[in-house]
Image: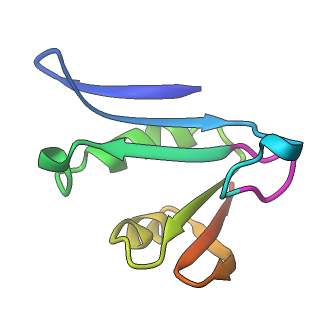
Amino acid sequence: MGLIAEDAGERIGAAWVRLLQGDDRGYGHVDDDTPELSVAVRPQWRNRGVGTALLLRLLENLPRVSLSVDSRNPAVRLYEQLGFEVVAAEHTSLIMLRRA
């Protein structure tokens, strides 16, 4: 499941989840029943609410979701505000989980 943000026909951001299991799991894997979240916003559109809007809409339908993020990424604050909690950390990589 995923969403794309557009402005005047230009794709400016996207957020999506995938249920990756077993050997195909991603960096944010928590368990085989929890989908992993990915978000991307074009640099010139960051810090303008695009990622937040995408996440809020996507999270409406997800009772549980995980992600992987670099601890130095400013988006960590946003994820925490949206209810994500750190469940594992290795070096600068965090795995975060949100339970609805």
- Does 30 appear in magenta? yes
In the image, farthest residue toward the top: 9
Q: Quadrant of the N terminus?
A: top right
Q: Main secondary structure of the magenta part?
A: loop
The residue nearer to you, when weighing 97 against 69, is 69
Image side of residue 8 versus residue 78, left or right? left
When the figure is inspected, residue 44 is found, relative to residue 27, above or below; the finding is above
In the image, farthest residue toward the front: 23
How many numbered marks, from 0 up?
A: 0
The residue nearer to you, when weighing 22 against 7, is 22
- Does 77 appear in magenta? no
Residue 99 at x, y = what percent?
A: 71, 58
Image side of residue 58 versus residue 54, left or right? right
Residue 76 at x, y = what percent?
A: 43, 71
In the image, farthest residue toward the bottom: 91
Image side of residue 71 versus residue 89, left or right? left
Residue 100 at x, y = what percent?
A: 69, 54
Quarter occupied by residue 19: top right
Residue at the location (45% across, 68% down)?
81
Residue at the location (52% across, 28% down)?
2
Quarter occupied by residue 86: bottom right
Q: In the rendered structure, which segment of residues is drawn in magenta?
A: 29-35
Residue at the location (79% across, 59% down)?
30
Colour scheme in use: rainbow
When the figure is inspected, residue 86 is found, relative to residue 4, above or below; the finding is below
Residue at the location (23% across, 24% down)?
6
